[in-house]
């Protein structure tokens, strides 16, 4: 299944052969007769339709909470309306008319611990910083996190729950591995951090659906570009990709994202991908 030289690298970082094989089994991209985008599109579309239908409060100070994931003492969810839904918010762009507008379907991803709201809503700079710090503690766990986020980008670990709604369900084997090697990220458990990123990615799809005049979600914009940018950062941090190349991507349109090329994902994460 693997060459001895490749395995020795991971063995030197504390992976037994059985753990190595389990991670490969759980994280490898499954062989499909359709592209990742075509596989993900109907699931993303269904999730966005559900999210838009969740109730919203009457104002920014009186929001309604939709609880999505219960993780130990945490629960992860969204509050509606988000700040971009305010009628006087004019920092979004309608990609059909090019006019500045609001996003009436915006949501605020939230983390609660012991029923107390985490007052810090992580912005992208803080998320980048939290991921960067992992470079100094555990490169293998960081690599595994990168593949988890790549899989989440294309909803490969989303399954329908008892109510028929798609929800993220990361492999318990993979999550247990990460929890043992990453104590926390930005002051919350690594599991809560991952599911928080899922709710953030869902909101990006909602925004794309609302403003980009492409309601079928056939392209990478939204969830895919957001999470693929984090995966690209991780490829740099684990010394698989040039920092200059990553930074240069931000200078190109559309600004603010630098998604990893999914056709080259195995160049940066060779162990955990069988086919793209």
Image: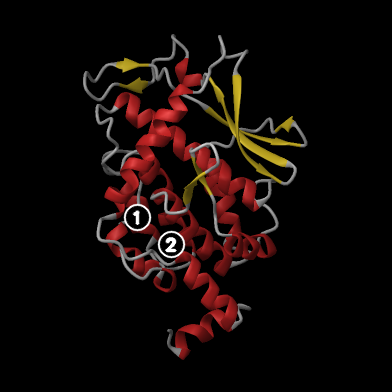
On the image, the x and y values in percent for residue 39 come to 31, 50
Question: Do the CB atoms of the residues marked 2 and 1 lie less than 8 Å apart?
Answer: yes
In the image, 43 versus 132, the foreground residue is 43
Which quadrant of the figure has residue 3?
Answer: bottom left
Compared to 135, does 91 lie above or below?
above
Q: What is the number of the mark on residue 220?
A: none
Q: How is the image coloured?
A: secondary structure
In the image, 73 versus 265, the foreground residue is 73
How many labels were placed on the picture?
2
In the image, 127 versus 181, the foreground residue is 181
Q: Which residue is rendered at x = 47% and y = 53% of the image?
A: 157
Compared to 4, does 250 lie above or below?
above
Residue that badge 2 annotates: 235
Specify whether 140 is left or right of 259: right
Residue that badge 1 annotates: 260
Q: Earlier in the sequence, mark 2 or mark 1?
A: 2
Specify whether 37 is left or right of 89: left
Compared to 167, does 180 lie above or below?
below
Which quadrant of the figure has residue 214?
Answer: top left
Specify whether 1 is left or right of 63: left
Residue 126 visible in the shown view:
no
Residue 243 visible in the shown view:
yes
Residue that extends furthest to the left in the rendered view of this protein? 96
Q: Which residue is rendered at x = 43% and y = 14% of the image?
A: 89
On the image, the x and y values in percent for residue 47 come to 42, 36
Label 1: which secondary element: loop
Which quadrant of the figure has residue 245?
Answer: bottom left
Cα separation between marks 2 and 1 = 9 Å
Residue that extends furthest to the bottom in the rendered view of this protein? 4
On the image, the x and y values in percent for residue 94 come to 28, 21
């Amino acid at each position: 299944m693997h060459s001895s030289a490749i395995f020795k690298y991971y063995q030197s970082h504390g992976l037994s052969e059985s753990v190595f094989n389990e991670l490969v089994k759980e994280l490898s991209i499954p062989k499909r007769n359709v592209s990742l985008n075509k596989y993900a599109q109907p699931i993303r579309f269904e999730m966005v339709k559900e999210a838009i239908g969740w109730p919203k409060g009457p104002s920014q100070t009186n929001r309604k909470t939709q609880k999505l994931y219960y993780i130990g003492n945490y629960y992860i969810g969204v509050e509606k309306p988000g700040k971009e839904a305010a009628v006087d918010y004019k920092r979004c762009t309608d990609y059909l008319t090019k006019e500045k507008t609001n996003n009436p379907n915006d949501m605020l991803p939230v983390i609660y611990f012991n029923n107390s709201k985490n007052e810090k809503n992580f912005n992208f700079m803080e998320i980048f910083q939290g991921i960067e710090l992992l470079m100094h503690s555990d490169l293998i766990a960081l690599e595994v996190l990168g593949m988890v986020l790549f899989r989440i980008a294309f909803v490969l670990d989303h399954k329908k729950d008892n109510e028929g709604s798609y929800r993220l369900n990361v492999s318990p084997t993979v999550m247990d591995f990460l929890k043992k090697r990453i104590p926390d990220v930005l002051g919350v458990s690594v599991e809560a951090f991952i599911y928080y990123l899922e709710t953030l990615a869902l909101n990006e799809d909602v925004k794309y659906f609302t403003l980009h005049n492409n309601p079928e979600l056939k392209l990478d914009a939204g969830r895919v570009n957001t999470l693929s940018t984090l995966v690209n950062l991780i490829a740099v941090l684990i010394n698989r990709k040039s920092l200059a190349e990553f930074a240069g991507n931000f200078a190109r349109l559309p600004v603010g994202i630098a998604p990893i090329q999914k056709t080259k994902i195995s160049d940066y994460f060779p162990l955990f991908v069988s086919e793209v």
